[in-house]
Amino acid sequence: MTYINKKFLASALAGTLLAFSAHAATINIHNGGDPTSLDPQKISGDWENRIDGDIFEGLVTEDPKDNPIPGQAESWKVSDDGKVYTFKLRDGIKWSDGQPVTADDFVFAFQRLMDPKTAANYAYLQFTIHNAEKINKGEIKDFSQLGVKALDPKTLEITLDNPTPYFLNALMHYTAYPLPKHVVEAKGDDWVKIGNIVTNGPYKPTEWVPGSHVTTVKNDQYWDAKDVKIDGATFYTLEDQSAALKRYRAGEFDILTSFPADQYEWIKKNLPGQAHVVPFLGTYYYVLNATKPPFNDKRVRQALSMAVNREVIGPKILGTGELPMYSWVPPGTAHYGEPAYVSWKDEPYSQKVADAKKLLADAGFGPDHPLHAQLRYNTNDNHKKIAVAIAAMWKPLGVDVELYNTETKVHYDEMQRGQVEIGRAGWLADYNDPINFLNLLSTGVDMNYGRWSNADYDKLINQGNAETDLTKRAAIYKQAEQLALDDSAAIPIYYYVSQSIVSPKIEGYEDNVQDIHRTRWLSVKQ
């Protein structure tokens, strides 16, 4: 929304002051789920990333197209062997309380990220850093052995175990944001509370009402504050997409980060040019708890996967053109080429169902002994439609499905704690590389919600991580992907398209493959 601040002084000056009144632009963003924290090491969702990516900035940051550009670092050099990165921090960068941002703040943040006591779910994204995994697993107790060193207050050196082609992209992720060491040490876990928190990004939070909204204002200490055109944003928690669309139409929201898919045709007709439906690096899938019967049986997992009619979900159930997913890594992912696919991908659907019935019968399930399963999903109109449809697809197999939904925060907490038989999940790439998807099936990773574990798979992933030849690396990863698909490690359903609505008054919004749109790059037409 746009508002006008007017200072009224003496009546003799009123006309002059009104002529020069300042126009302060703010925006209202429908953000979906309720954030669990503002601490970048305690979050895991895209709805949280939208906030934290506005209030913090790493060594490297995103341009409007989500390409890596200098952030807190003005430049960097890479050693000839590709394993040592030396970053030179910008002159005069500060936290929002005016204290300088130093290389020690980055060292402190990376050490805290890897500290097992922090229990950061996404610590593994930075395991390419020397000794990171060993410290995170408690095998090394001396945090100074982590490959992140402050050579002086303005110079940071990061050493990797192996050359990593996506490392700069990984530094754009919130796990690589610095933390204000002076505040965290003084306030402990309370450092993120409003009134305590200080940030180094274009914005700083001023209000957080759980279940309602987070409000930010421009950080005047930010190094590029003069070019930040929007003065603040409010991120609203609202999982009811129909209600969000109504509020957008009423002018209460400027950006919707999702919308009811069955309204897509209406939106195109009545809100021309405002819907942004764009393919991007994301996957929608179901996990099955591979640690508990009957889902520890590959035959059961494969039968349920084969019976999902993926071809009807995008065009008919959702209506926004999502593509059927038969691989684990999306096509077009960098450094990969064509992904692996399930062996039954091109069978007629009727044959898939017949094969699925036989697999379940072999596993001991049938009309006289039906399979009972609970399918969990987080509250969302589209998730419900898909769950209802897939439950109907499984019914001819003799599968009795109980649908169970909770709010997003609760859903993912229960998933991470293994309190699920079958659960809906989605993954939006943190960086454009196959390992970001393949890691989701690695043993011990928190986001491996189904707890599927395979020693041969883990061995291939580790082998690929150590390979410096990108062609050989891709081939090894593809072997791992094929192994997981052959074992029905999870149920891939469709490749995401971003579904946003943007007000015509918002300028600078650029579609990109990771659906990241920092407020810093936006402006509001006056």
Image (tube, rainbow, N blue to C red):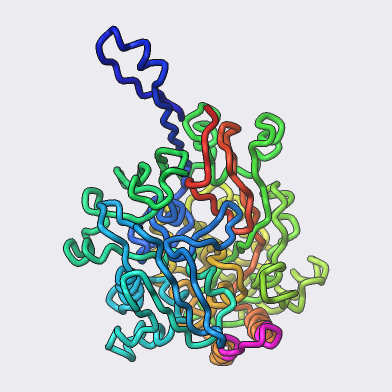
Pick whichever, 526 or 348, lies toward us. 526
Pick whichever, 252 or 509, lies toward us. 509
Residue at horizontal 59%, vertical 77%? 165
Over which residues does the magenta segment extend?
463-474
The quarter of the displayed image where residue 338 is located: bottom right
Q: Residue 423: where, in percent of width, then height?
A: 51, 65
What's the magenta bit mostly, secondary-structure-wise? helix
Q: Is residue 359 above or below residue 197?
A: below
Query: Quick one: which residue is furthest to the top in this view?
Result: 12
Visible residue check, residue 213: no
Q: Residue 475: where, in percent of width, then height?
A: 70, 85
Q: Is residue 387 magenta?
A: no
How many dots with numbers? 0
Q: Is residue 473 magenta?
A: yes
The quarter of the displayed image where residue 199 is located: bottom left
Visible residue check, residue 220: yes
Relative placement, left or right, of 300 versus 61 is right
Residue at horizontal 69%, vertical 55%? 322
Q: Is residue 160 above or below residue 253?
A: below
The quarter of the displayed image where residue 266 is located: top right
Query: Quick one: which residue is furthest to the front in this view?
Result: 91
Q: Residue 492: where, in percent of width, then height?
A: 64, 68
Q: Is residue 391 above or below residue 478?
A: above
Q: Is residue 307 above or below residue 65?
A: below
Residue at horizontal 56%, vertical 73%? 436
Residue at horizontal 43%, vertical 50%? 224
Q: Residue 299: where, in percent of width, then height?
A: 64, 81
